[in-house]
C-alpha cells in the first residue's frame, strides 16, 4: 500500500508526513499505529456500518517515545498542540494535536515476577511489543508511513470470526483483568470468547495460580486482583453496555475473581439497573451482593465515601434483621419509618442501596427515599421564629413534631 493511498480516520497525510520527519530526527527505527484504533478500523473496512474510528490513537515506536514526541512538537505550531504530557519513568507521552488524542509509547516487553503483580518492563522491538497484549484482535499494527499491516497472531482472522483469543497460555494467570476487558469487548463488538480462551479461563480459576486467595487480608491482594481490577470495572460501567458485560462475566464464571457470592448472585443485574435509576454509584451496588462486601471493597480500594456507603447500608440491614424489628417493621407507619431511618442518621443513599439489594421491606425504603423524607410541615422554621421560638434543638424538635402530625393528619402512605 503506497503512502498516498493510506487513509486513517482523523489522521491526515500531513500529520503522517510530520511524524515520519520527526521519527527520522529522533532516530526512530519503526513507527506503528496499534491497539483498538487499528482493530476498529479493520472492522469498519469489512462492514462500513460498524465502528468508524476511536477517539484515541496509540502509537508504538522502536526507540525513545520521549525523543520522538519532542521532535514532533518541534515540527508543529504551538497552537496545534492542546496537550503535551511526558511520563519519563515509563517513556510514554500523551498528546493532543488538532483535537486528536495520541498516546506514544516505546516498544516494550513485560516479565511477570509473580502472577497478578505489576510486570517489569524492558525496551524491545515492535513484534515483541505486540506479543504482550491481551487479545489477538488488539495485536495488529499498521506501520507508518506506508500503512503496511503487521499481523503475526491471526488477529484479522479473529476479527472475521468475531472471536476473542488470548495471545498465550498464561494470559489470565499473568493478568486476570484481561478477562474483564474481554467482557467489555464482547459486549461492545458483539464478539464471543473462543473455546481456547474459555478453557484457559476455567483451568486458571481451578488452579488459582495467585499466591493471594479470597478470604486472605485484602491489603495483600496483587494489583491485578485489586486496584487494576477496580479500574476495569469502572471502565465497564462508564463506557460499555455494562449489562451485557456483567452477563458474560457471570456466564463465563469470571465473577469468581471478585467473589463467589457474586458469581451465584443472579439478582445483580436488577440491582444495578435500580442503582443507576436512583443515581447511586455502581460499584457499591454490585459489591453489596458479595459474601463479604466490605472486604471486597477494601481489596478493590474503593473510594472511602463508597466504602462508607456500603458500611451504612449493611448496618441498616443488620438493624432490620434484629428479632425485635424484623417482623414488627412490616406494620410500621410512614411516621415510624421516618423516625427510625432518620434518628439513626443513615444516609439516603445507604437506604436506597439496601432497597436496590431487594430487602423484603424494599418498598418501604423506596417510599421513604422518594417521598416521605421530603415531606415538610405546613409551618416553616422562619414562621415559628416569628412566633417567638428561639433557633436551636428545641425548634428542630418542634418542626419534627409538626411534620409527624402533618403526616398522620393527611394519612400519608
Image: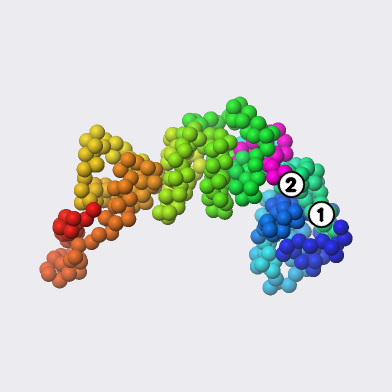
Q: Residue 352, can we see it? A: yes
Q: Callout 1: few (<14), some (14-19), or many (20+) C-alpha neighbours within 10 Å?
A: some
Q: Which mark is residue 203?
A: none
Residue 113 in sight here: no
Residue 166 on the magenta span: yes
Percent of width and height locating residue 9: 73, 62
Outermost residue toward the top in this view: 207
Q: How many marks?
A: 2
Q: Residue at x 66, y 67 (%)?
A: 99
Residue at position x 69%, y 42% in the image = 163
* Residue 132 image position (x, y, % from top left): 72, 42
Horizontal arrangement in the rendering, residue 180 relative to residue 264 (left or right): right
| Disc 2 target residue | 160
Q: Is residue 162 magenta?
A: yes
**Residue 280, horizontal then vertical, whole percent:** 42, 52
Assign a secondary structure to mark 1: strand
Q: How is the image coloured?
A: rainbow
Residue for badge 1: 143
**Image position of 274 with respect to 86: above or below:** above
Residue 154 image-quadrant placement: top right
Most distant residue in the right direction: 2
Specify start and end residues of the magenta stretch as a single range: 160-178
Residue 269 on image: x %, y %:
47, 44
Amino acid at each position: 500500500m503506497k503512502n498516498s493511498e493510506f487513509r486513517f480516520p482523523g489522521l491526515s497525510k500531513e500529520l503522517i508526513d510530520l511524524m515520519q520527519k520527526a521519527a527520522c530526527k529522533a532516530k526512530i527505527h519503526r513507527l506503528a499505529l496499534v491497539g483498538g484504533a487499528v482493530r476498529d478500523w479493520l472492522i469498519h473496512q469489512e462492514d462500513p456500518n460498524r465502528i468508524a474510528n476511536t477517539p484515541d490513537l496509540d502509537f508504538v515506536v522502536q526507540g525513545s517515545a520521549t525523543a520522538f514526541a519532542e521532535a514532533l512538537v518541534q515540527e508543529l505550531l504551538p497552537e496545534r498542540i492542546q496537550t503535551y504530557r511526558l511520563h519519563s519513568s515509563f517513556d510514554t507521552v500523551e498528546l493532543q494535536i488538532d483535537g486528536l488524542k495520541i498516546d506514544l509509547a516505546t516498544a516494550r516487553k513485560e516479565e511477570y515476577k509473580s502472577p497478578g503483580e505489576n510486570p517489569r518492563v524492558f525496551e524491545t522491538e515492535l513484534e515483541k511489543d505486540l506479543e504482550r497484549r491481551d487479545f489477538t484482535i488488539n495485536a495488529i499494527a499498521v506501520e507508518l508511513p506506508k500503512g503496511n499491516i503487521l499481523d503475526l497472531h491471526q488477529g484479522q482472522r479473529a476479527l472475521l470470526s468475531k472471536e476473542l483469543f488470548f495471545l498465550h497460555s498464561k494470559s489470565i494467570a499473568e493478568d486476570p483483568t484481561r478477562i474483564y476487558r474481554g467482557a467489555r469487548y464482547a459486549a461492545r463488538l458483539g464478539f464471543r470468547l473462543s473455546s481456547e480462551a474459555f478453557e484457559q479461563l476455567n483451568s486458571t480459576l481451578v488452579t488459582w495460580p495467585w499466591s493471594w486467595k479470597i478470604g486472605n487480608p485484602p491489603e495483600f491482594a496483587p494489583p491485578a486482583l485489586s486496584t487494576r481490577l477496580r479500574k476495569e470495572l469502572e471502565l465497564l460501567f462508564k463506557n460499555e453496555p455494562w449489562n451485557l458485560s456483567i452477563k458474560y462475566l457471570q456466564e463465563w464464571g469470571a465473577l469468581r475473581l471478585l467473589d463467589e457470592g457474586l458469581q451465584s448472585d443472579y439478582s445483580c443485574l436488577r440491582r444495578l439497573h435500580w442503582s443507576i435509576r436512583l443515581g447511586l454509584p455502581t460499584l457499591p451496588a454490585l459489591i453489596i451482593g458479595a459474601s463479604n462486601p466490605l472486604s471486597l471493597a477494601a481489596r478493590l480500594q474503593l473510594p472511602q465515601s463508597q466504602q462508607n456507603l456500603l458500611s451504612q447500608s449493611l448496618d441498616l440491614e443488620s438493624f432490620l434483621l434484629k428479632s425485635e424489628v424484623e417482623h414488627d417493621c412490616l406494620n410500621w407507619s410512614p411516621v415510624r419509618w421516618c423516625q427510625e431511618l432518620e434518628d439513626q442518621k443513615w444516609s439516603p443513599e445507604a437506604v436506597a442501596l439496601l432497597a436496590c439489594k431487594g430487602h423484603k421491606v424494599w418498598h418501604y425504603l423506596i417510599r421513604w427515599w422518594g417521598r416521605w423524607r421530603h415531606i415538610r410541615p405546613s409551618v416553616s422554621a422562619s414562621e415559628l421564629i416569628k412566633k417567638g421560638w428561639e433557633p436551636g434543638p428545641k425548634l428542630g424538635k418542634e418542626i419534627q413534631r409538626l411534620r409527624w402530625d402533618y403526616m398522620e393528619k393527611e394519612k400519608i402512605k
